[in-house]
Image (cartoon, rainbow, N blue to C red):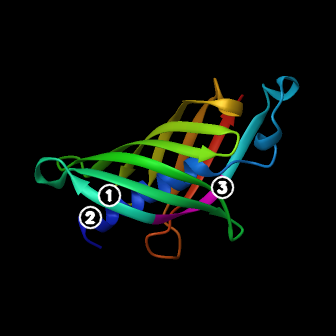
Amino acid sequence: MNRTSVICTVAGALAAGALVASTTAGTASASDSARSHTLTFRSHTLGSTNAGTGGHLLIESDRAASSGRTIGYTANTCAFDFTTHQAHCYVSLARPRGQMRFKATVSVDTGAITGKVVGGTGVYKGITGTVTGHPSSTPDVPVITIHWNG
């Protein structure tokens, strides 16, 4: 897999991860604002482009899917570090009741994704948590898991 494909896959995974929400997230209220939530989904790239000097930036959009159903869409920007073989990404996951935002690092060598939820809007306002991911058995369709409180 070439560097651009790996970066696109990682960015897609991150975007998808950001888009997925648990069934309780769509109905969050003040009474369950402290509850823990977990989302697991697959990220499908809709489009991407390389930018920046030497193509070190990737701008991408993805469709997040769970059980074959679209659960949201992401917009993300990743900066590739050629020295460390990592992509550093900022992702916004759009959902009908708000957006979830996170920062994640993707290993181009292994496809592993790690990161932090850094906030959101609507029902996701004030959330914190973690993001992890890994390649799936389907090329360029990573599996993303988001854990958050709020």
Q: Is residue 41 magenta?
A: yes
Residue 135: x, y in percent? 48, 65
Residue at x 51% of width, y 76% of height = 138
Quarter of the image where the C terminus is located: top right
Name which of mark 3 and mark 1 comes first in the sequence.
Answer: 3
Task: Please tell me how crowded label 2 is: few (under 14), some (14-19), or many (20+) other residues with Cα within 10 Å.
Answer: some
Amino acid residing under circle 3:
Thr
Task: Between residue 92 and residue 150, name the one nearer to us.
Answer: 92
Q: CA distance from mark 3 to mark 2?
A: 25 Å
Is residue 95 depicted above or below 31 in this figure? below
Is residue 11 depicted above or below 90 in this figure? below
Q: Is residue 87 magenta?
A: no
Majority secondary structure in the magenta region: strand
Residue identifier under label 2: 4
Asked if the residues shown at circle 3 and circle 2 are in contact, with their CB atoms under 8 angstroms apart, the answer is no
Residue at x 33% of width, y 64% of height = 6
Residue 81: x, y in percent? 22, 46
Query: From where the camera sits, is residue 128 visible?
Result: yes
Quarter of the image where the N terminus is located: bottom left
Q: CA distance from mark 3 to mark 1?
A: 21 Å
Amino acid residing under circle 1:
Val
Which dot marks residue 108?
1
Task: Between residue 138 and residue 73, name the one nearer to us.
Answer: 73
| Stretch of the chain drawn in magenta | 40-45
Name which of mark 3 and mark 2 comes first in the sequence.
Answer: 2
Residue at x 88% of width, y 24% of height = 31
48 vs 12, left or right, is left
Residue, far front: 96
Is residue 122 depicted above or below 112 in this figure? above
